[in-house]
Image (cartoon, rainbow, N blue to C red):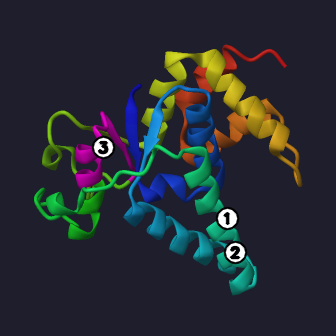
Amino acid sequence: MFAAILDTCVLWPSLQRDFLLSMAVEGLYRPLWSEAILAELHEHEIEKLVDRGMDHSLATLRASHLIDQMRTHFDDALVTGWEPLEGTYGLNDPDDEHVVAAAVVGGAGVIVTDNLRDIAPDRVPSQVQVVTAAQFAADTVDVDPLRAVAALRQISGRSANPSRSVNDLVALLASRYGMDEAAEILQAHLVE
């Protein structure tokens, strides 16, 4: 199955993360990450929740629960043994070397990141593509739009406070995350 490293920056936005991971649950691709990515996500999730007014200890529990759920539902996603390659790619930001190293060791065909400035495609080995979350969503939805719609139906079924229809979710993916191309493909296959 096609594998993709999901960088922290594409996992941080809640709905975007839910959509990307729900498509993986539907079998459209295999997500990959490293301990470094999960640690960054944990830290940033706490900050996000605290910024939204949540108590720090509750935010920490919530962030830990998120990481535990990711580990549980994607028990084959963790890439290990990437550390020896860290620092060998000459990226603009050496702190992002772990993402490329994990992609190479994990056999990912793509790195999904919105940080193209620091993870420049010309610095990544040729067997690994670097794409934005919006482009990855469009490419993945295009593989099997009906399974992508099924992923959205699962998200819709879980949504509460506020509840969101599949059409609402498609509109949010386009307006919040620039997933216009994916939204267009999804709309063509929606029958609500």
Q: Earlier in the sequence, mark 2 or mark 3?
A: 2
Say which amino acid is labelled 1.
His
Q: Could you say where residue 155 lies in the image, as x and y percent from the top left? A: 75, 39
Task: Give how far apart the Cα atoms at labels 2 and 3 are.
Answer: 29 Å
Using the image, determine if residue 78 lies above or below residue 91. Answer: above
Task: Give how far apart the Cα atoms at labels 3 and 1 are.
Answer: 24 Å
Q: Nearer the viewer, residue 152 or 190?
A: 152
| Residue named by callout 1 | 65
Q: Residue at x 63, y 20 (%)?
A: 147
Q: Residue at x 51, y 65 (%)?
A: 41
Q: Could you say where residue 18 lies in the image, as x and y percent from the top left? A: 64, 46
Which quarter of the rendering shows the N terminus? top left
Q: Quadrant of residue 54?
A: bottom right
| Residue named by callout 2 | 61
Q: Quadrant of residue 25?
A: top right
Write down the region rendered in magenta: 100-114
Q: Can the viewer see residue 96?
A: yes
Which quarter of the rendering shows the C terminus? top right
Using the image, determine if residue 46 lies above or below residue 115. Answer: below
Q: Residue at x 61, y 75 (%)?
A: 46
Say which amino acid is labelled 3.
Gly
Query: Badge 2 local density, few (<14 within 10 Å), some, or many (20+)?
Result: few
Question: Is residue 161 within the magenta segment?
Answer: no
